[in-house]
Image (cartoon, rainbow, N blue to C red):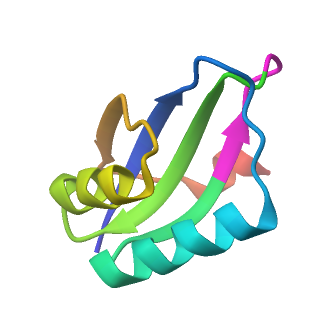
Amino acid sequence: MALFVIERNYAEQLNLTTDIARLVTEINSDVGVHWLFSFLSADKKKTYCLYEAPNAEAIREAARRARLPADVIVEVTQLRPEAFT
């Protein structure tokens, strides 16, 4: 599976509940998308998420079903684990 970084812009501050997170996980599973981790901006209006997915269209479909923005989707061609140490 390919890796993708998704930038999501929110008009209001993000307020993610356990129920919403569970629903998003179910939708992702149905579409074949797997969330790895996310970063939240200080103002809580933007997230950057790393996903495994078969293609960018699967991410768009999951976002559409979950009614979440997916403003920018970029395929990651190389990940260097040593950059995180």
Q: Position of 11 compared to 59: left or right?
A: right
Pick whichever, 84 or 69, lies toward us. Answer: 69
Q: Position of 18 compared to 28: left or right?
A: right
Pick whichever, 75 or 78, lies toward us. Answer: 75
Q: Quadrant of residue 32?
A: bottom left
| Residue sitting at x 66%, y 62% | 20
| Residue sitting at x 37%, y 72% | 33
| Residue sitting at x 50%, y 80% | 26
Determine whether 4 is above or below 11 in the image.
below
Q: Quadrant of residue 61?
A: bottom left
Determine whether 84 is above or below 12 in the image.
below
Does the segment drawn in magenta span residue 42?
A: yes
Q: Position of 67 compared to 77: left or right?
A: right
Determine whether 63 is above or below 7 in the image.
below
Q: Position of 12 compared to 34: left or right?
A: right
Does the segment drawn in magenta span residue 59?
A: no
| Residue sitting at x 16%, y 55% | 57
The boundaries of the magenta stretch are 38-43
Determine whether 13 is above or below 50 in the image.
above
Residue 68 point in image, percent of width and height: 46, 44
Pick whichever, 27 or 38, lies toward us. Answer: 27
Residue 72 point in image, percent of width and height: 34, 30
Residue 76 point in image, percent of width and height: 34, 48
The quadrant the N terminus occupies is bottom left
